[in-house]
Image (cartoon, grey):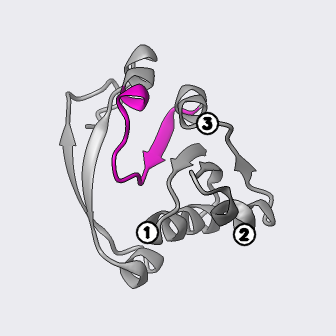
């Protein structure tokens, strides 16, 4: 499965690494491109812009402090749904795959996500 991933802060970088270790193909984007270098060395693609990633992939995880209205509009334009989630944890629980996720939905989508 291919996933877009936006944001490489403390949790985002480790979450992306976990996805790679579990066989997902991940395309990444970060405002500070130098944070992506370790992943590029592993053959990971870097997207040109957040909206391009949202438009291309069925699933995109955003670990941004403030996802812009532009991203929300790009998601809605595809007919997809925006799932907002609060992530509880730190670097070690993230690495161990033990984050707690509290999610809020705009409505349930066709796959039951949300």
Looking at the picture, does residue 11 appear above or below residue 86? below
* Residue 63 is one of the magenta-drawn residues: yes
Which quadrant is home to the C terminus? top left
Pick whichever of labels 3 and 2 is earlier in the sequence: 2
In the picture, residue 69 is in which quadrant?
top left
Please name the residue shown 77% across and 60% down the image.
40
Label annotation for residue 49: 3
Q: Residue furthest bottom?
A: 92
Q: Nearer the viewer, mark 3 or mark 2?
A: 3
Is the residue under label 1 in contact with that under label 2 (CB below 8 Å)?
Answer: no
Q: In the displayed structure, does residue 14 sit left or right of residue 69?
A: right
Looking at the picture, does residue 14 appear above or below residue 6? below
Name the residue carrying label 2.
38
The boundaries of the magenta stretch are 57-72
Nearer the observer, 73 or 84: 73
Please name the residue shown 34% across and 78% down the image.
90
Q: Give the spatial CA distance, label 2 vs label 1.
A: 15 Å
- At numbered mark 1, what does the secondary structure look like: helix, strand or loop? helix
Nearer the observer, 49 or 78: 49
Please name the residue shown 62% across and 50% down the image.
28
Q: In the displayed structure, does residue 75 sit left or right of residue 85?
A: right
Q: Give the spatial CA distance, label 3 vs label 2.
A: 19 Å
Name the residue carrying label 1.
11
Please name the residue shown 23% across and 29% down the image.
108
Q: Give the spatial CA distance, label 1 vs label 3.
A: 20 Å
Q: Residue furthest front?
A: 32
Pick whichever of labels 2 and 1 is earlier in the sequence: 1
């Amino acid at each position: 499965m291919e996933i877009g991933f936006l944001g490489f802060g403390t949790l985002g970088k480790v979450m992306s690494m976990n996805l790679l270790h579990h066989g997902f193909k991940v395309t990444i984007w970060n405002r500070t491109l130098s944070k992506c270098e370790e992943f590029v060395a592993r053959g990971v693609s870097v997207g040109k812009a957040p909206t391009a990633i949202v438009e291309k992939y069925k699933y995109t995880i955003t670990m941004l402090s403030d996802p812009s209205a532009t991203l929300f509009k790009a998601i809605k334009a595809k007919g997809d749904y925006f799932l907002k989630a609060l992530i509880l944890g730190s670097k070690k629980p993230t690495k161990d795959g033990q984050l707690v996720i509290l999610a809020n939905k705009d409505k349930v989508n066709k796959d039951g996500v949300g």
